């Protein structure tokens, strides 16, 4: 009887904790939507911001954000998933090299974003002479999201039953063929989850981006051009007191963009799983 009472208490605590977190998230989103939706129109989305910042839209910031996010994912996703495959499928459990990779990955995950920004500025912008550009910002963002992609991919691969590997090898398939056709498809939902989390961080990053990609208001035409992301634009509007209304409008579009990306990724994954089944 006492055990059942304790289970009910702890179940209630867990439910209250989940409800509290959901309430906080919903309150933030509702407040941003309430303050930001007032300034949302076609002109705000499709026109470039003015130099003063009090007029114009955020079209160049939207394009800059998409550039930075896509390029950083192209860099980080192959490296992160390949590292996870090596650690879980090829490296020995007693390997010092694998241990070093795991420690390095955990350390990178705990480094503040401003440190990444300073490193990107010194190494990519100054030393490699890439200048303030999308490629400099994307490579810096790739370093930031790499630990998340690697760790989530590791856990996803680790969750695949070992019998899948044994059965595939017993049927005559090679190790790489098994990984490519059995392990990766089974672990794909977890890998996609890590990518979605990484997208959220890349879209919302400010300090590292402003130090490496710059804050140009011009439309970026290539990855060698400087760009202003939506988060940087939001930061400048809010901190410099240019237009708080447009800052909330930008925040609203950042939330919408992340929701669209998450919905598209989950929908694609679900359809892929259904067709694969």
Image (cartoon, rainbow, N blue to C red):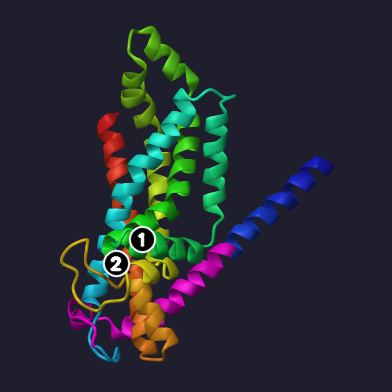
Q: Position of residue 166 (x, y in %)?
A: 44, 13
Residue 22: % across, % down:
54, 63
Residue drawn at x 44%, y 65% is: 117
Highlighted range, magenta: 21-50
- The residue under label 2 is 131
Q: Residue 269, position in %: x, y?
A: 31, 42
Q: What residue is drawn where x is 28% and y is 59%? A: 135
Please rate how many residues cluster around mark 2, counting C-alpha atoms within 10 Å: few if below 14, some from 14 to 19, many from 20.
Answer: many
Q: Quadrant of residue 134?
A: bottom left
Q: Given the current orientation, which residue lies at the most extreme front position?
A: 127
Quick one: SS at disc 1?
helix
Query: How many numbered markers are drawn?
Result: 2
Q: Is residue 100 visible?
A: yes
Identify whether 67 is placed above or below 229. above
Which disc number belongs to residue 257?
Answer: none
Look at 79% across and 47% down and name the residue there: 5
For the N terminus, the quadrant is top right
Mark 1–mark 2 CB contact (< 8 Å):
no
> Measured from the top left, where is residue 97 in percent x and y?
53, 31
Q: Secondary structure at mark 2?
A: loop
Q: Main secondary structure of the magenta part?
A: helix
Magenta highlight on residue 214: no
Quarter-of-image position of residue 15: bottom right
Quadrant of the drawing holding the C terminus: top left
Q: Residue at x 47, y 47 (%)?
A: 147
Separation of disc 1 and disc 2 at Cα?
9 Å
44 falls in the magenta region: yes
Residue denoted by label 1: 127
């Amino acid at each position: 009887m006492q055990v059942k009472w304790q289970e009910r208490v702890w179940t209630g605590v867990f439910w209250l904790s989940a409800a509290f977190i959901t309430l906080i998230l919903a309150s933030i989103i509702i407040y941003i939507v309430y303050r930001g939706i007032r300034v949302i129109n076609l002109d705000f989305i499709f026109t470039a911001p003015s130099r003063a910042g009090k007029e114009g839209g955020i079209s160049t910031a939207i394009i800059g954000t998409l550039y930075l996010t896509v390029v950083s994912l192209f860099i980080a996703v192959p490296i992160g998933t390949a590292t996870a495959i090596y650690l879980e499928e090829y490296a020995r459990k007693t390997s010092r090299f694998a241990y070093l990779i795991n420690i390095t990955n955990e350390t990178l995950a705990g480094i503040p974003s401003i440190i990444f920004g300073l490193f990107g500025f010194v190494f990519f912008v100054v030393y490699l002479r890439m200048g303030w550009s999308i490629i400099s910002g994307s490579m810096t963002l790739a370093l930031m999201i790499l630990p998340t992609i690697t760790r989530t991919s590791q856990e996803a691969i680790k969750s695949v039953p070992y019998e899948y590997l044994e059965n595939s090898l017993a049927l005559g398939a090679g190790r790489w063929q098994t990984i490519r056709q059995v392990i990766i498809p089974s672990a794909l939902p977890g890998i996609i989850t890590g990518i979605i989390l990484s997208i959220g961080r890349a879209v919302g990053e400010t300090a590292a981006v402003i130090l490496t990609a710059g804050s140009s208001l011009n439309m970026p035409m290539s990855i060698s051009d400087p760009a202003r992301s939506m988060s940087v634009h939001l930061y400048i509007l809010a901190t410099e007191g240019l237009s708080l209304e447009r800052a909330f409008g930008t925040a609203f579009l950042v939330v919408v963009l992340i929701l669209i990306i998450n919905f598209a990724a989950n929908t694609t994954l679900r359809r892929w799983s259904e067709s694969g089944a």
